[in-house]
Image: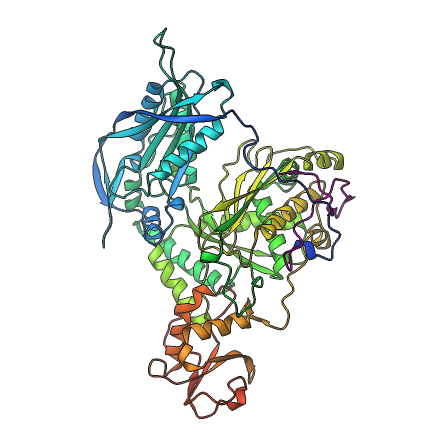
Amino acid sequence: MSRCRSFPTARHGRLNNVAHMVSPGHVDSAASSSRTMPTRQATRTRGLLRRGRSVGLVPRPSVTVRFSGTRSAEGPLNIGQYNILQWLRGESEQFFAAVAGELDVPAAAVVDDVAEALAVLIGRHEGLRTTYVDGVTPRQIVHATGDLVVEVYAIEAAEPQLVDRAGLSRDLTRRLRAAGAYRIGELPVRAALAVLPGDASTSSAPVVQAAVLGCSHLAVDYQAMEIVKREFADLIRGRTAPPAGGPPIQPLDLVALERTPKALRHEESVLGYWGDRLSRMPQCLYPVPRRTASNEPPLRGTNDPGSVAVELTSTAAGMALRAVTARTRTSRASVVLAAIGAVLSHRTGTRDLVLPTLSANRFEPYLRHHVGSLAQLALITLTIGDTTFDRLVRQAWTAVVAASRHGRYDVDRQRAVAGRVEHQRGIVFDCEPLFNNLVIESGPATGRATAPVPTPGELEAARCATQVRRQSMPIGTTLIRFDLYGTDGELRLGCWSSDTDRICDDEAESLLLAVENLLIAAASGDLDARGIRGSIPLSPVERGPGWLFVDGCWVEVAEVQRLLDDALASTGARVFTAVHGVPLAAHLARTGAVGTPGQAHAACMAALKAYPTAMAPQHYVICERIPGDPDDPAAWIDVCCQGSGREGVDS
C-alpha cells in the first residue's frame, strides 16, 4: 500500500499530504484518538512491487556438492547451541526454527559455480557440517567430509528476461521449508537453485537466476547467515582468500572458552543482572483490553485466522534515521528502538520499560566472523519520562550495550532465576523478543556519520511512497513484536502479534505509522517531551476502574477472575481489588486439592500463561465453605488459613 498522509508534527505543523485513516471499527484504536487524524482511506496494494509474467519452476535432477574440512570432532554443545536446542524442543512451529538467505549470484553463473562456492563455505565453517545428538547431555559431531544435495528447478516463463528474482527466491524458500523441520541428526544446510535452461545448439550450461540457502537455527543465527552470504558472494566471484584475521573460531572451540574462570565469573554477573531486571519487568509489555467481553472466549485459536503481521517500508523514515543518527552519534537501530519505546510508553502509560530483545553477542573480535548460533535473549531498560528524543536515543544506545554485555548465559540457570522471580511476583514473563534487530548497519562508522537534514518538502514527498503490507504469520506465543529488517535508504519495520483479540492488524499498523511519524518529526531537530507526545498520533489506552497498577504491572481484574475460574474452579474463588489494603486478595473455599495458600498459588501460576494481563493474587484467604454471597468479601468467614503462597521460595 502506497500512501500520502497528514500527521501533526511538533516542529513544522501539518505535513500537507493526502490523508490516511485506520479502520473505525476497532474500539480504542488509533482512529478513536482525540488528536487530529487523517480522514481519507488510502488504497492497499498487495504483492510484489515488480511483477514478472507467469512463471513455473520444474524440478530437475539435483546436484551433489562434495565438501571437505580440516577435521572431524565431537564434543558438548556451546552456550548458544544449547540455548537454541532448548528452544527447539518446545517450538511446535518449524517455520521459526530455520534461517533462509538469498544468495548473491552474478550474471552468467552456472550450477557448478554455485556448487564450488558452497563446498568451500561448508568446508571453512564447521557449524555447517555439524550434526547433533539430543539427550541428557547433548553432543555435536563435526564431519570432516560429506555431501550436500542441492535442489535444482528449471524456470518456465514466456519472457524469462522479465522474471522477478526476488519472487523466485521466495518460491525457492517455500520449497525448502516444505521439506519440514531440520532434524538434528542430519546436515543443517539445504540449498535450492532456479536456472534458465542452456542453449542446446551451443551446449551452454543452464544459468542460475536465483539461489537460496536454508540453515537450521542450531547452525546459524541471522548475523551468521549474513556472514555466509557475504563470503559466498566473494567466492563465486573468484575472491577466494579467507576473511582477514585468520581462521574463524569454530562452534566446538567455544566450549572451552566458556568454561574458563573468567567466563564463569562473568556468568554470575549476568545472572545477577537478569534477576534485577526481571524484578522490574511487567508481566505484559502491551497491556490493552481484549476486544471481546471478559466472559466470552478470546478471538484466538480456531476462531482466529492466525497471527497478524504488518510491515512498513518508509523512505521518509529512512531519511529521518540518517539525520537523527548523525546528530546523536549513535546507530540507526538505537534510533528506531527509542521511537518504538516512546510510542509504546505513550500508548500503554508505562513509564519504565523493560524490553526483551536479541543480543547478537559478537562484541569480541574473535566472534565477528563466527558462523554459529550466538544470539540470545537480552533485556533492555528504558525510562520514558520528561526527556528529549535525542537523550532517549542515547539512552537506548547505552541500554543496548549494557544488555549485550549480559547476553550470554546458561539458559537453564537463567530460567531458574526467572522462575524464582515469577513465583515471588505472581507473574509469568513473555520472554519472546519485543524488538529484534536483523540489520547489520553499513556506511560510515557509528559516531562519525554525517547526513543532511531533510526539508519538510523532501519529507512530504518521500512520505507519499510509504508502503504498508499486511500478511499472515504462523501462530506463535508473543503478544507483540517489532522486527527491524532494513535501515539503508529506507526503514523496513515489521510489527506482529499472535493475540489478535488484543492487537488486530489496524492496531499493529497504527503503531508502525506512529513510529514513522515520530521519526519524521525528529528529523530536523531534537524534540522535547511535549514534542514527542505531540508527534505520536495515538491516544493512550483507556482502562477504566477494572484495571489496577500493581508491582509495576497493569493488571486487568476481570482477567484475574478468569484465571481463578480456570485454576481454582472447584473452590468458588473470588478476587477483590483490595482487602485491608492488600491488592488482589483472593478468597476461596478449601478443597481436597487446594488447602493452603501455597497450593492455591501453585495452581494459579500453572494456568497464568493464558492470561497475559492477569497476575496471581497477592494474598489468598482460604475458608471452610463458599458463602451465600461470594462477591461480598465480608461474607467469607470461617477462615482456615491465609497468606501470599510464596513462603519457602528464595527471592
x 49%, y 18%: residue: 159
Compared to 510, does 112 lie above or below?
Answer: above
Q: Is residue 91 visible?
A: yes
Q: Residue furthest bottom?
A: 638
Q: Is residue 185 left or right of residue 46?
A: left
Quadrant for the C terminus, please.
bottom left
The answer to whether residue 398 is magenta is no
Quarter of the image for residue 115 reads: top left
Q: Is residue 339 visible?
A: no
Compared to 150, does 18 lie above or below?
Answer: below
Quarter of the image for residue 301 reads: bottom left
Along the viewing direction, whichever of 538 and 392 lies nearer the viewer: 538
Q: Is residue 63 left or right of residue 276?
A: left
Along the viewing direction, whichever of 70 and 433 lies nearer the viewer: 433
Q: Indicate the position of residue 597 as horizontal and vertical percent values.
A: 40, 80
Along the viewing direction, whichever of 257 and 353 lies nearer the viewer: 353
x 54%, y 35%: residue: 47
Q: Indicate the position of residue 570 as horizontal and vertical percent values.
A: 40, 80
Quarter of the image for residue 114 reads: top left
The answer to whether residue 8 is magenta is yes
Q: Indicate the position of residue 3 as horizontal and vertical percent values.
A: 67, 39
Quadrant for the N terminus, please.
top right
State the predominant SS element of the stretch in magenta.
loop
Compared to 298, does 208 lie above or below?
Answer: above
Q: Indicate the position of residue 453 as horizontal and vertical percent values.
A: 70, 35
Q: Is residue 150 left or right of residue 230?
A: left
x 44%, y 30%: residue: 169
Q: Report the magenta residues as a range.
A: 1-29
Question: How many discs mark residues in the rendered view?
Answer: 0
Q: Is residue 477 left or right of residue 592?
A: right
Compared to 625, does 549 lie above or below?
Answer: above
